[in-house]
Amino acid sequence: MSHASIVLLPGRLLTEPELRSAALDGEVTTLGEGYLPLDTPLTPFARAHSLAPLLVEPRILLSHRTAAWVWGWLPAQPAIATSVPVGARISSGRRRRLGTREVVINESDVRRWGSVGVTTPERTLLDLARHDDGDDVIELLARALRDQPALHDGVLAHLGRTRRTSHSRRARSRLDAAAALANGDQPLLTR
């Protein structure tokens, strides 16, 4: 099965009612904007591809908590969050609907599967540590670090290389608290 056919999107091979019937019959499960056959592994590619219908332009990237879901750090899909590189403006209506932020981002911070772009695990962790205001952000970061322990040192090294990164002190504090939690230590109180 090719990568493009892993997630079944309405209108390509089957209509929405046919896919809903297949879900009721237990042959597929809903995933993002599409459906995943039950015998198909739930991978970052499948999660990202399931949101492709929302990303009408390749310059719109899945980011923040949506990227965390793509990488498997969240059990349920959160509200859509996207980013575009500064200068790649999109209409204000689309920006509001997709929760889009304009960000300074290098292509090396993006993983692309066809027309779907998602921030890399390192960039996702950095964005969450710097900007996420959820009450569970430390636990979310800890889940990411349990899944990919090397991310902690990579993100801290990135923060050390960039001089003018906003909220870098907050990010370091949160990452240290998350690393302690991921290692089974008592988390520090940070906010």
Image (spheres, grey):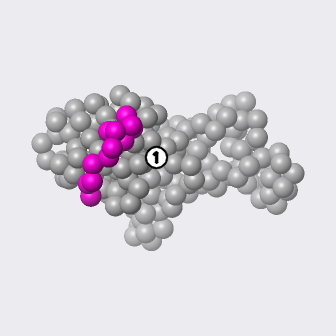
Please give the residue where the numbered disc 1 appears in the rendered image. 68
Along the horizontal axis of the image, is 4 left or right of 45? right
Residue 89, above or below 182: below
Q: Is residue 29 visible?
A: yes
Q: Amino acid at mark 1?
A: Ala
- x and y percentages locating residue 114 in the rendered image: 54, 38
| Residue 122: quarter of image | top left
Nearest the eye: 116 or 66: 66
Q: Is residue 124 visible?
A: no
Identify the residue shown where x is 73% and y is 30%: 1
Residue 181 part of the magenta-drawn span: yes
The region drawn magenta spans: 180-191
Identify the residue shown where x is 69% and y is 38%: 6
Nearest the eye: 99 or 114: 99
| Residue 132: quarter of image | bottom left
Nearest the eye: 169 or 50: 169
- x and y percentages locating residue 39 in the rendered image: 76, 35
Residue 189 part of the magenta-drawn span: yes
Question: Which quadrant would the C terminus be assigned to in this image?
Answer: bottom left
Q: Main secondary structure of the magenta part?
A: loop
User: Circle 1 sits in a helix, a strand or a loop, which is it?
Assistant: helix
Identify the residue shown where x is 56% and y is 49%: 75
Count neighbours of disc 1 (C-alpha within 10 A) and say few if under 14, some if 14 to 19, many if 20 or more: many
